[in-house]
């Protein structure tokens, strides 16, 4: 069963995304220097490109391989990157809550008024990103370091994949990934940010998830050949097209 991961935008993404972004974020002070083409839209263009181009970025997802790393020599791995990125409830992890995450994408689940989130932001002052959702229009977030970003590739496989596209688009020299372990671990409630997390993607069929993972890596392999990408998490079937990329580069 093939369900397109590009369901959030068709060939007119650059138009529909800009219209939605203008409507949702127009009253936010951060909403400026908007870059938009048919693959991605994001704000703070000059600042983002200047900061992250030619840098090494590690993207930390909530899958079980993140805890496996955190229970080993994670400090050595983290030291090999210029910036750490994460998402959602990362600040609930007992180790990550004491580590500086430079940028984090927030979807709809986290409570941005919670003590845990506010304490983390006060301590580390991360850059917080939002995608195109009406929630951010109705629930104004007051924070100094905000931006918005969304890729035309969307699907059900998670925000970390969209963050990989974002990092590559900004011209990152190297992108590492950990905690992108796929649907099986989600169904087992094996999560590094939330104990016994039970929420699943809107479509939780294995064949659909695998198809969208394959399409994701085909997209990245085609469009972002200059960025070195390293999976320091589990080598599983969800990343089989990524493994093909490595073989072709040798």
Image: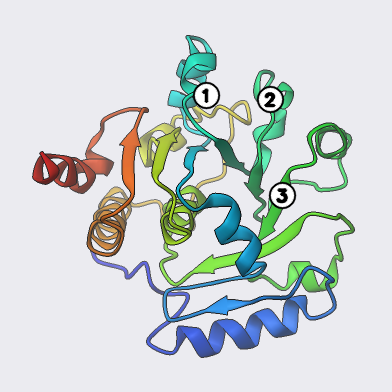
Q: Identify the disc placed on residue 99.
A: 2
**Residue 97 percent across, percent down from the top left:** 72, 26
Of 192 and 3, the residue lying toward us:
192
Earlier sequence position, callout 2 versus callout 1: 1
Q: Secondary structure at mark 2?
A: loop
Q: Residue 156 occupies which quadrant of the picture?
A: bottom left
The residue to which callout 3 is attached is: 127
Q: Is residue 198 left or right of residue 25?
A: left
Q: Are marks 3 and 1 in contact (CB under 8 Å)?
A: no
Marks 3/1: CA–CA distance: 18 Å
Disc 2 crowd, CA 10 A, few/some/many (<14, 14-19, 20+): some
Q: Is residue 155 left or right of residue 211?
A: right
209 versus 79 height, above or below? below
Disc 1 crowd, CA 10 A, few/some/many (<14, 14-19, 20+): some
Asked if one can make out residue 188 in the rendered structure from this viewpoint, the answer is: yes
Q: Identify the disc placed on residue 78.
A: 1
Q: Give the number of callouts.
A: 3
Asked if one can make out residue 131 in the rendered structure from this viewpoint, the answer is: no
Q: Quadrant of the C terminus?
A: top left
**Residue 76 percent across, percent down from the top left:** 49, 15
**Residue 88 percent across, percent down from the top left:** 65, 44
Residue lying at 37% horizontally and 87% vertically, measured from the top left: 11
Q: Are marks 2 and 1 in contact (CB under 8 Å)?
A: yes
Q: Secondary structure at mark 3?
A: strand
Q: Secondary structure at mark 1?
A: helix
């Amino acid at each position: 069963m093939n369900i397109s991961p590009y369901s959030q935008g068709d060939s007119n993404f650059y138009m529909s995304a800009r219209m939605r972004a203008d409507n949702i974020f127009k009253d936010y002070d951060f909403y400026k220097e908007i870059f938009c083409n048919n693959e991605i839209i994001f704000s703070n263009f000059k600042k983002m490109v200047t900061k992250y181009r030619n840098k090494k970025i590690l993207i930390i997802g909530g899958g079980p391989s993140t805890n496996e790393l955190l229970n080993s020599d994670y400090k050595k791995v983290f030291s090999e990157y210029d910036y750490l990125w994460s998402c959602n409830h990362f600040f609930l992890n007992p180790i990550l809550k004491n580590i500086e995450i430079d940028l984090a994408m927030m979807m709809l689940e986290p409570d941005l008024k919670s003590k845990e989130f506010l304490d983390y932001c006060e301590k580390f002052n991360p850059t917080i990103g939002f995608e195109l959702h009406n929630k951010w229009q109705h629930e104004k977030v007051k924070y100094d370091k905000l931006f918005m970003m969304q890729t035309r590739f969307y699907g059900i496989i998670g925000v970390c994949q969209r963050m990989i596209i974002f990092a590559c688009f900004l011209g990152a020299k190297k992108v590492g990934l950990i905690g992108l372990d796929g649907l099986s671990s989600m169904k087992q409630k094996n999560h590094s940010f939330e104990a016994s997390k039970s929420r699943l993607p809107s479509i939780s069929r294995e064949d659909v998830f695998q198809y969208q993972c394959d399409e994701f890596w085909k997209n990245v392999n085609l469009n972002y050949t200059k960025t070195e990408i390293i999976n320091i998490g589990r080598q599983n079937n969800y990343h089989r097209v990524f493994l093909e990329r490595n073989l072709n580069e040798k």
